[in-house]
Amino acid sequence: MREFDIIVVGAGHAGLEAAFASAHKGHETLLITLNVNLMGNMPCNPSIGGSAKGIVVREIDALGGMQGKFADHHYLQMKMLNTGKGPGVQCLRCQQDKIEYPAYIKEVAFNTEHLHIEEAMVVSLLHDDKKVFGVITNKGEEIKSKAVILTTGTYMESKIFRGKTVLEEGPDGEAPSKGLSPYLRSMGIKTYRLKTGTPPRIKKDTIDFSKGSLEPGTRGELAFSYETTEFIPVEEQIPCYLIHTTPETHDIIRAHLDEAAINNGLVVGVGPRYCPSIESKIVNFADKERHQLFLEPESRYTDSIYLQGFSTSMPVEVQEEMVRSLPGFDKAEFLKYAYAIEYDAIRTEEYGPSLEIKKWPGLYIGGQICGTSGYEEAAGLGLIAGINASLKIEGKEPIILRRDQSYIGVMIDDLVTKGTEEPYRLMSSRAEFRLLMRHDNADLRLTELGHEIGLINEERYAKFIDKKNKINQAVETLKATWLGKKKEVEEYLMSLGFNELKGGVQAFELLKRPNVKFAKIKEFIPELQEISYDKQTIEEIEIIAKYEGYIVKQIHEAENMRKIEEMKIPEGLDYLNMDGLALEARQKLDKIRPLTIGQASRVSGVNPSDISVLILNVRRVMNHE
């Protein structure tokens, strides 16, 4: 019988991060996939990043994960979103090459030490009554391991729908994963059905792009990974376009609503609220005259255009009517019809913040099997599952990222504390401390942890420490420097439209003013002139100065929350018989089994009065121990 340290089931974005993390930590890792040619496949939109999601990719890179490096390698277009807003919501999004992205991942994976890859379907698990210790494949082979990570994406018992047509297929018409889901239920692990979907792909030369508005990339050296040094000039990037639905489009959809799979009773899974099908948009936003759609290329090597915002489960003949009613699409030819896909996921109460299944030590999950949507959310979860499975077999405590520390931490806490009945989507509005968790400072938040875990090497860590020291030194020098009435300072400020200085001013306070740049201020301070600062370091210094008041306020709020967050709840606490707790609080707390008072306070249905009772009981138990 073959044996590995860790077995990862599924080679999508979650499985890859889990497998790379395990292998990079030196553990012999087996990655099992249904099709090695689809490792890192993008069956929906071939893009990485977006609102909040782009920051997740930066966090993955800061911890030592891989998605940011892959995304920077072959992008078609790179764009910084929300540049007109504050730094707390700015983030990257890139359009990827659907051909080159998975091809590059496959090349890297097959040349990674300690990582073994093979094709098979896992149908059941090896376990006793205490823990999971391996898998059984459809070939009948038993393979042992110290930990198993399930990252099955949207493949478990999956079906795709177009109108009344139902096919037992996975994404892109691939074979579904059969057998594992019912086996998990036989182990007492609860599953539920979720649904997502994808729009049609249209042949490029059958679209009149003059009917849309150009959406170019953003100029500058933009990257997800802190280690990226090569960038594609915006002139060489491929543009996207924006169009809108028409009144005719809406009429066609309304006339055929009962034919959509999501309305005809065939689909039982719950779909994503924040990424609905076009027919759901027409129904739910009936007063809206039009909906925006983005025309996005899928590869340099194909003529396929992705119609973002037009996901549908309509029959193919209706899809043709709908698409040809759009501006510039009257002669559109289909390369692939849209579909809805339904699959099994594991209920959120089954796993804890480490992503280990509560009832079955040694079994971890990551990605869409956790109840999420999106490549970025999947990769973040996969990375944490891979890290924690590795730490488990090393005899170390798992890492639990805080809500004020990372978007990945927000996502996991939301899932295990609040649960979800639909595919969870990460958004900046879910984070209370988003000014602390910006695109620019992911490394300052997480790279030391990545180094401690063993995923950030010494060379990269040394560069990070140098950057961190430069930022701290610059801020300290700016705060300690008083700029008097110097002619060059006066001229600079007046060139920006400011009034003449009355007396001196602290350099740090000066930098807080709109349009005042660190690169110019350092010219007035000899101690800073001798130091070289890269663009990212300068950006960080300016944000620290210009948003100091808001940042300090959020730091204080986070510290206050951390006090109750760090108050741990003893295992085995009897919530159901706890005097003073409301009935709903008893049931919810018993179901979720929170690890800390902070987590308990975020459980829906648990009120402040319940938390007060809980704290008293926790203290009583702790005093008796």
Image (tube, rainbow, N blue to C red):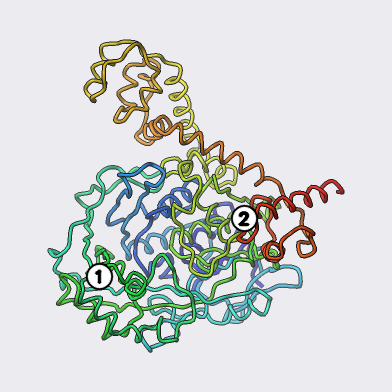
User: What is the number of the mark on residue 195?
Assistant: none
Residue 165: x percent and y percent?
A: 38, 88
| Image quadrant where one finds the N terminus | bottom right
Instruction: Tell me the distance, in whole angstroms, between the alpha carbons under discs 1 and 2.
Output: 39 Å
Q: Quadrant of residue 44?
A: bottom left
Pointer 1 or 2: first along the chain: 1
Q: Judge from the rendering whether residue 524 lies leftward or rightward of residue 341; answer left or right.
A: left
Q: Residue at left 58%, top 51%? A: 25
Residue at the right extreme? 624
Circles 1, 2 touching at the beta carbon (< 8 Å): no
Q: Quadrant of residue 142?
A: bottom right
Give the residue type that dot 1 points to. Ser
Q: Is residue 444 visible?
A: yes
Name the residue beneath numbered marker 1: 304
Examine the rendered structure and indicate whether residue 52 appears above or below residue 500: below
Give the residue type that dot 2 points to. Asn
Q: Judge from the rendering whether residue 447 lies leftward or rightward of residue 231; answer left or right.
A: right
Name the residue beneath numbered marker 2: 388
Residue 230: x percent and y percent?
A: 31, 45
